[in-house]
Amino acid sequence: MNEELLSVGIDMGTSTTQLVLSKLHIQNMASAFSVPRLVITDKEVVYRSDICFTPVLADNRIDMQQIQTFVVEQYQKAGIQKEEIQTGAVIITGETARKDNANEVLLSLSGFAGDFVVATAGPDLESIIAAKGAGAHTYSKEHNTAIVNIDIGGGTSNLALFASGELMDTGCLDIGGRLIKVDQGTHAITYIAPKIKQLAERRGIELALGMVVTPLTLEPIIGEMVKLLEESVGLRQPSDFYDTIVTNKGLKLERPIPCISFSGGVADYIYKEAVGDVFQYGDIGILLGRAIAASPLTEQMTVARSAETIRATVVGAGSHTTEISGSTITYTEESFPIKSIPILKLTRADEAGSDEVLAQAIADKLNWFKLNNDLQRVAIAIEGKSSPSFAEVQKYARGLYKGMAELLEREYPLIVIVHHDMAKVLGQSLYALLDYKKDVVCIDSVQVDNGDYIDIGKPIAGGKVLPVVIKTLVFH
Amino acid sequence: MNEKDLKSMIESILNEMVGAAPGEQGAAAAATTPTAPTAAPQVVKPEVQSAGLMQTSMPAETAGKAGKANRAEGQTEGHESMSAQEQTVEDNDDYLDDITEIDLRKLLLVPEPADREGYMKMKEKTPARLGVWRAGPRYKTITSLRFRADHAAAQDAVFSYVSEDFVKEMNLVAIETMCRDKDEYITRPDLGRQFSPDMVEQIKKHTIKQAKVQLMVGDGLSSAAIEANLRDIVPAITQGLKMYGIDVGNILFVKHCRVPSMDVIGDVTEADVICLLVGERPGLVTAESMSAYIAYKPTVGMPEARRTVISNIHSGGTPAVEAGAHIAELMKTMIDRKASGIDLKL
């Protein structure tokens, strides 16, 4: 059995908006004599859109109308109908995520793009998606090494660290190619981002609006930006400005990182020389790329070639956001897709005790999800046990059942996500406790954490598995 | 090849592995080779210790005695050789660490691997004994002993019985095939699938005619598998079937059970679906692996292709509880679609 999922990825970034279509291949990898084990075996990008500027209205709001037109055009060009799209993600990144109507645009666009196209936002997710699109996680797995991918865009540099295919950490710095803008004709500075201005002042570098610049006069400030990038991956001790330049958090840097890859618009000028005027885009992107290429970042670290540069984020959104659940799961309702459910992940201590302890922990922590005393829908995530006894499964079921009482009162379906392979029996146990009257969705083999959201799509592969997207929804 | 020949062949291979010269077999080896077995532990001991595998060291003489006990196996039969080993331990007034408790997937004996992490990653993905290194052209002692230990566990699983207490505890209806003992069970597969007329009456008495499902349990080739998994899988199946409104009646326990015995039960009970939980032929990875053979209206003489199999049910494979939940759903599908085996397209 081989099934295909058509997936769309849409990236609304600071400066550009793009779209890709990917095919995800799903196969049962288990032998005919065992329980099924469906996995995504291959991901291929089948269509890449034009790159358009993110349309912004006069009042600094995102122009939803134009983006929809763009999506319709691209679907036409690719020769597909919206109904054929089975999964995918819209990600809103950088400056665009800070616009007033970001949330609204994101949600309506995800609905517009397809039935199970999920809305995502957040700097950590952005780093992860870009790194996966660039192929950093695959590189770290194949070479059994640690690698940091830096996605350098117009406004930010998103870092994601992978070791042997596993995500270790993420970080983000306010360093990008469009933080200083230069007039293409006169080469006079037209914009300086506040943090860069501050950096120049701190370092005594002359930098002012209207100043006519050459690559040589910009060298000191760009040099300082590159130094901060070196600090972010541990090649240099953090300077006094490092904490200021960090957007939300940096990498933890417990061990030296041997390899590095680059994605984002600036990455093109790290991997290859630019043709023509260095100010052709009206910014310092080309010069920044050049400076990185000549820095210890490429000299002291092994540079891995990215699979994607400027399209890394959109390819990541299209190809690397959808996962599939374990193949032995329980769901008793068919009201999929279930969208944007926040996750409550319990601690090991919560799970280790009796069912009463588990129930109490859930009941207490559900209060975190109350807005104006009104409880939202919440999915409960537990670690579970590998090869549990039936008695242990019952303990989990009783704890979950009691703890989720408040959700049941509100007629919400019980959504349980367990890491170890036990979702089918746990789901059936819960369903029995509910006297087969309330709905249960219990899936396994998915890793989630507090702060994540989950979207669950319609069953695929003959109903054996559910496509899921684990994501964040953070607007700055 | 009969079973005795096979056994002596395996023993000769094992003897070679623990250090006896090739060609020496059984009793002959015990008499003539005091030196070889002590040599191997001496080579191995410091490395084993430095790898931090054993909390206490294994004295060369203990290992040597264990080696002798091993070779005594030629004179004794299966189980007795185990007691010979236990005897050695008691004689010593000391104890040996249980080497079967070492997780082989985490044990790398290659002294200076170029990429330890890479090797361990590879080992994580397979139960195959990779990276066992060598002593001269042979396996190291720890590898040989572990092989013997796992092999012994496999033999025990085949030759032991599911305890009567366990059958009672699980509330199973005990029946047996035409085989009189384990030897006959091993050598006469045809008898392992037949029941005496008395037994057929017993089955009729304790089962419901034309039930939706009939569960049965068979010792098969591993009694250990049954004792390890049944407690967890039976309630999971029962709970799962209850969800579909299907009741599980009495569960049969078949001693000396071969898979096609389920066909007889099918004919006798006329149940829609028969599910047989049976101990799998043990291997060196685990002796506790169980299979579920499930068929829609099985009948004597039907093609094997009509059976659906879920294999590899054990703590390191598919967890028993999860397999049980899956089996319940599978049986429901079979009832709905009136098919099993290759006729049932899933």
Image (cartoon, rainbow, N blue to C red):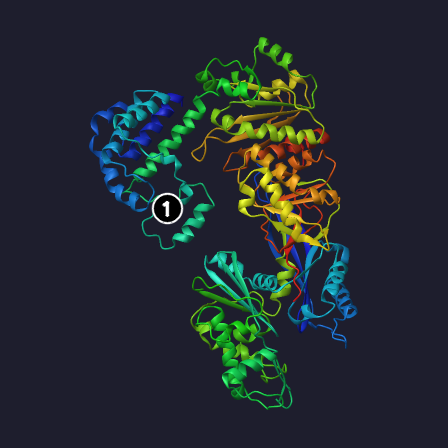
- Residue B206 vertical position relative to residue B282 in the rendered view, above or below: above
Q: Quadrant of the C terminus of chain B?
A: top right
Identify the element where label 1 is drawn.
Answer: loop
- Residue A294 vertical position relative to residue B153 in the rendered view, above or below: below
Residue A430 place in picture, x, y as percent:
66, 37
Residue B113 place in picture, x, y as percent:
35, 52
Q: Is B209 or B263 nearer to us in this picture?
A: B209
User: Is residue A212 shown left or right of residue A239?
Assistant: right
Q: Is B321 or A37 nearer to us in this picture?
A: B321
- Residue B300 vertical position relative to residue B122 in the rendered view, above or below: above
Q: Is A406 or A340 nearer to us in this picture?
A: A406
Q: What residue type is labelled 1?
A: Leu
Q: Quadrant of the N terminus of chain B?
A: top left
Question: Label 1 crowding class (10 Å Cα cut-off): few <14, some 14-19, many 20+?
Answer: some
Q: Is B277 or B345 nearer to us in this picture?
A: B277
- Residue A374 vertical position relative to residue B39 in the rendered view, above or below: below
**Residue B208 in view:** yes
Residue at the spot of label 1: B108
**Residue B21 in view:** no
Residue A148 place in picture, x, y as percent:
50, 65
Q: In which quarter of the image is residue A73?
A: bottom right
Q: Which chain carries label 1?
A: B
